[in-house]
Image (cartoon, grey):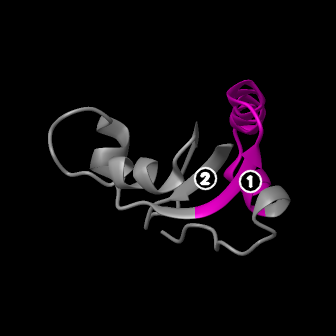
């Protein structure tokens, strides 16, 4: 089983990805060492706020691309998170 997931950082930014192992991937995004994942490393810590299972990696990748094409945090909040995650406050 593969999962499309959305992470959120304390500033309210989202990160969208897909994986076969959610726990391992979340731990990887929250690493603080100096290898790999510059965006998630310097913008964390990240919290899992949404995930959706898919039977194949191809299905998960299609859904990930669809969500990323929205390019709107507000659309993610209203369509996927049902308003559960508050918008970022500056």
Give the class, few, some or many, for how many residues have Cα within 10 Å of label 2's Cα (few <14, many ≥20). Answer: many
Seen at 29% across and 46% down, the residue is 41
Classify 10 Å Cα crowding around label 1: few (below 14), some (14-19), many (20 and above): some
Mark closer to the chain start, 1 or 2: 2
41 vs 57, left or right, is left
Q: Which residue matches tag 1?
A: 76
3D distance between C-alphas at marks 1 and 2: 9 Å
Locate residue 19: give its quadrant: top right
Residue 86 drawn in magenta: no
- Of residue 55 and residue 42, the one placed in the foreground of this image is 55
Q: Which residues are magenta?
A: 49-77
**Residue at 54% in and 62% down:** 48
Q: Are marks 1 and 2 in contact (CB under 8 Å)?
A: yes
Q: Give the number of the disc on residue 6.
A: 2
Q: Position of residue 10 (x, y in %)?
A: 43, 67
Q: Quadrant of residue 77?
A: bottom right
Check the image and name the residue furthest to the left. Answer: 34
Discs 1/2, front: 2
Q: Nearer the viewer, residue 81 or 87?
A: 81
Residue positioned most to the top: 58
On screen, residue 87 above or below 58: below
Say if the magenta span includes residue 71: yes
Question: In screen coordinates, is 56 left or right of 27?
Answer: right
Kindly report the secondary structure that dominates the magenta region of the rendered protein. helix
Where 63 sits versus 74, above or below? Answer: above
Choose between 90 and 16: the one closer to the eye. Answer: 16
The residue at 63%/68% (across/down) is: 87
Q: Going by the image, does 26 lie left or right of 66? A: left
Element carrying mark 2: strand
């Amino acid at each position: 089983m593969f999962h499309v997931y959305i992470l959120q950082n304390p500033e309210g930014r989202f990160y969208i990805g897909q994986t076969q192992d959610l726990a391992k991937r979340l731990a990887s995004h929250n690493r603080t060492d100096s290898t790999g994942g510059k965006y998630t490393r310097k913008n964390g810590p990240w919290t899992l706020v949404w995930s959706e299972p898919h039977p194949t990696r191809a299905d998960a990748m299609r859904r990930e691309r669809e969500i990323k094409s929205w390019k709107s945090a507000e659309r993610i909040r209203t369509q996927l998170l049902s308003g559960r995650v508050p918008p970022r406050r500056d």
